[in-house]
């Protein structure tokens, strides 16, 4: 049997089943409606009969009281006063959709209320000293009998009317009930036929599947072995890829209509690359190189194009900020099909080591020069001061002589102070180490710089990491170093809305401080001279503040890195190693 014929047969079966189910639903729905009618009518009859029974009991009770003058007989009357209003609420609700029945119920209510009034008047007028009934009492009894006959008559009309409705509903209910088994049987037979047809087809398909599965099993076994080998190789390569300390990125060339490279797309990126860029691999694979690195549009993107088009190897060193820390990377790009592979190797430690050696050599050389200058200058300076003191006794006591002698003395003292500052800035410090919170030291330094901050209307913002480990440092020396950097930042600000931002944080086994200002910035050509003795851009500066700061930090085995952009500001990053406990 063809698949088309099977589909046609199942479509016909489905249509028939749906039709029968619809008919069954209508049959059951009509049956439920007739059942509801029967229950509604039965409830009306029962409620009406309960009302009639209650009023009869009230009538019987008050007559018993008239005959015996015993209030025990009034108990049915009092119960009827409570029960009949409740039953009437039910009857009102049941008759709200049938205006004819509603009119009868309203009339019945009026008659029952009238009967209660007659009984109440009889009870109020009954003052009997003998067994003879008074004329008024006789009249009330006659009115009560007549009213009670009306109540019985109207109740019977309501009951008879509802009984006829019940008979009609029961007849309809029987018809719908008899049809239900037929429709159910038809549905079951058709369903069984469809199941049998489906079972037959399924058996054929299973037999065909068994034949084909035998043919495929061998091929699947071979493929499974190959998949396992490839999966193992893939996992091995992925582990090597993701655990590599170097950043590895693979790019494919994006070409325009003319075939020229206009951009590169990410093809792969290892875990180190996602950490460097602070984006997950999914994000990178959905973006281009210039979307992730917009600053690359220029020389670097041209270099990448040459790598792909000419097959040359490109190398350079570049600085990135990773976890609030400036890190140096060696970039190497090589061609890979119609794209390239770029690796970034972290050379920060090598750079820092070279920088520390260079700074140490400069400090050592500065110390030697300072001591030589101090020796060569202080001797003639001492002779000059002695000669000046002797000349003061022999010089005429004129105002001009006094002015010139004061000028010589003042400048001689300034030279002496410069020499002392130079020696202090270059010679190793004798440290008084103690465990101190770096956040507290920053607050102490900012307190000393408070007047300068207020004077220049600088906005200060601090972000201190909580629960930073304390450091073994010399309190006063580090405070001087911090104050020098803070003051340099304040004095570099020449705008109305100056900002000084200070933050502390921990990176692995180090505590770091960032001191950033939005001042004039420092040109790259000047950064290497920043810590040199006597280098300053300040009109009245000596150029020894940052030299002294570098000497203090070096004596604490701490490092300082300066990043600056002209017109945007400067950031000093200080790094202290944690105390070994």
Image: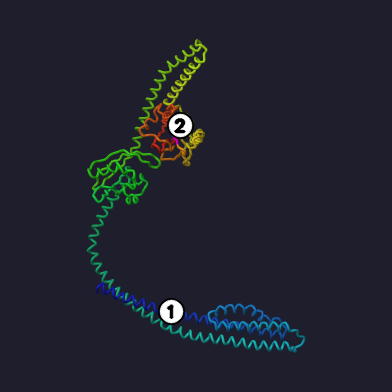
Residue 525 appears in which quarter of the rendering?
top left
Q: Main secondary structure of the magenta part?
A: loop
Identity of the residue furthest to the right in this view: 129
In percent of the image, x 26 and y 45: which residue is there?
340
Q: How many marks?
A: 2
Q: Quadrant of the N terminus?
A: bottom left
- Label 1: state its secondary structure: helix
Residue in the foreground of this view, choosing between 502 and 79: 502
Whether the magenta-drawn stretch holds residue 46 is answered as no
Is residue 516 among what the camera can see? no
Q: Earlier in the sequence, mark 1 or mark 2?
A: 1
Q: Is residue 291 above or below residue 122?
A: above
User: Mark 2 falls on what kind of element?
Assistant: helix
**Segment colored magenta:** 490-494
Instruction: State the CA–CA distance, disc 1 to disc 2.
Output: 94 Å
Residue drawn at (63%, 82%), measured in percent from left and top? Answer: 110
At which x and y percent is residue 156?
58, 87
The residue wearing badge 2 is: 484
Please state which of residues 297 and 207 is positioned toward the viewer in this rendering. Answer: 297
Residue at left offset 22%, top offset 43%: 310
Q: Is residue 156 above or below residue 460?
A: below
User: Does the residue at mark 1 contact the one at mark 2 (Cβ under 8 Å)?
Assistant: no
Residue 232 lies, in percent from the top left, at 28, 51
Q: Is residue 491 magenta?
A: yes
The structure's colour scheme is rainbow
Q: Which residue is mark 1?
A: 28
């Amino acid at each position: 049997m063809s698949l088309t014929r099977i589909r046609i047969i199942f479509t016909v079966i489905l249509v028939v089943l749906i039709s029968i189910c619809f008919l069954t639903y209508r049959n059951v729905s009509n049956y439920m409606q007739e059942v509801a009618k029967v229950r509604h009518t039965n409830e009306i009859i029962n409620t009406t009969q309960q009302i009639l029974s209650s009023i009869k009991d009230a009538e019987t009770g008050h007559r018993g009281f008239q005959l015996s003058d015993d209030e025990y007989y009034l108990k049915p009357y009092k119960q009827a006063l409570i029960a009949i209003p409740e039953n009437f609420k039910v009857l009102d609700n049941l008759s709200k959709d049938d205006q004819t029945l509603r009119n009868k119920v309203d009339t019945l209510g009026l008659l029952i209320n009238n009967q209660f009034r007659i009984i109440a008047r009889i009870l109020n007028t009954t003052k009997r000293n003998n067994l003879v009934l008074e004329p008024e009492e006789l009249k009330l009894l006659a009115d009560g009998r007549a009213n009670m006959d009306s109540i019985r008559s109207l109740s019977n009309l309501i009951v008879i009317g509802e009984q006829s409705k019940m008979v009609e509903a029961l007849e309809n209910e029987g018809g719908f009930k008899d049809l239900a088994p037929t429709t159910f049987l038809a549905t079951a037979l058709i369903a069984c036929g469809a199941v049998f047809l489906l079972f037959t087809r399924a058996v054929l398909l299973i037999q065909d599947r068994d034949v084909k599965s035998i043919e495929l099993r061998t091929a699947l076994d071979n493929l499974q072995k190959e998949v396992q080998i490839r999966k193992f190789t893939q996992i091995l390569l992925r582990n090597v890829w993701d655990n590599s300390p170097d950043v590895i990125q693979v790019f494919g060339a994006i070409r325009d209509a003319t075939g020229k490279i206009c951009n590169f797309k990410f093809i792969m990126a290892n875990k180190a690359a996602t950490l460097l860029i602070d984006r997950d691999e999914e994000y990178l694979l959905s973006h281009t190189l210039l979307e992730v690195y917009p600053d690359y549009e220029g020389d670097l993107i041209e270099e990448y194009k040459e790598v792909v088009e000419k097959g040359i190897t490109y190398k350079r060193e570049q600085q990135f900020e990773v976890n609030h820390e400036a890190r140096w990377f060696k970039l190497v790009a090589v061609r890979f099909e119609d794209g390239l592979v770029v690796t970034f190797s972290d050379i920060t430690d090598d750079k820092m080591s070279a920088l520390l050696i260079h700074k140490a050599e400069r400090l050592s050389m500065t110390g030697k020069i300072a001591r030589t200058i101090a020796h060569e200058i202080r001797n003639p300076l001492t002779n000059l001061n002695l000669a000046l003191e002797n000349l003061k006794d022999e010089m005429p006591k004129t105002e001009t002589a006094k002015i010139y002698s004061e000028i010589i003395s003042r400048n001689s003292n300034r030279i002496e102070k410069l020499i002392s500052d130079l020696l202090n800035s270059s010679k190793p410090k004798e440290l008084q180490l103690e465990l101190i919170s770096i956040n507290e030291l920053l607050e102490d330094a900012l307190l000393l710089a408070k007047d300068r901050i207020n004077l220049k209307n600088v906005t200060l913002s601090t972000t201190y990491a909580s629960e930073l480990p304390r450091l073994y440092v010399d309190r006063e020396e580090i405070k001087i170093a911090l104050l020098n950097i803070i003051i340099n930042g304040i004095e570099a600000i020449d705008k109305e809305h100056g900002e000084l931002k200070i933050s502390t944080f921990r990176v692995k086994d180090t505590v770091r401080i960032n001191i950033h200002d939005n001042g004039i910035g420092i040109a790259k050509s000047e950064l290497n001279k920043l810590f040199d003795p006597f280098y300053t851009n300040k009109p009245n500066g000596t150029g020894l503040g940052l030299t002294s700061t570098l000497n203090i930090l070096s004596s604490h085995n701490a490092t300082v890195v300066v990043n600056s952009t002209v017109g945007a500001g400067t950031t000093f990053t200080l790094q202290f190693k944690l105390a070994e406990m």
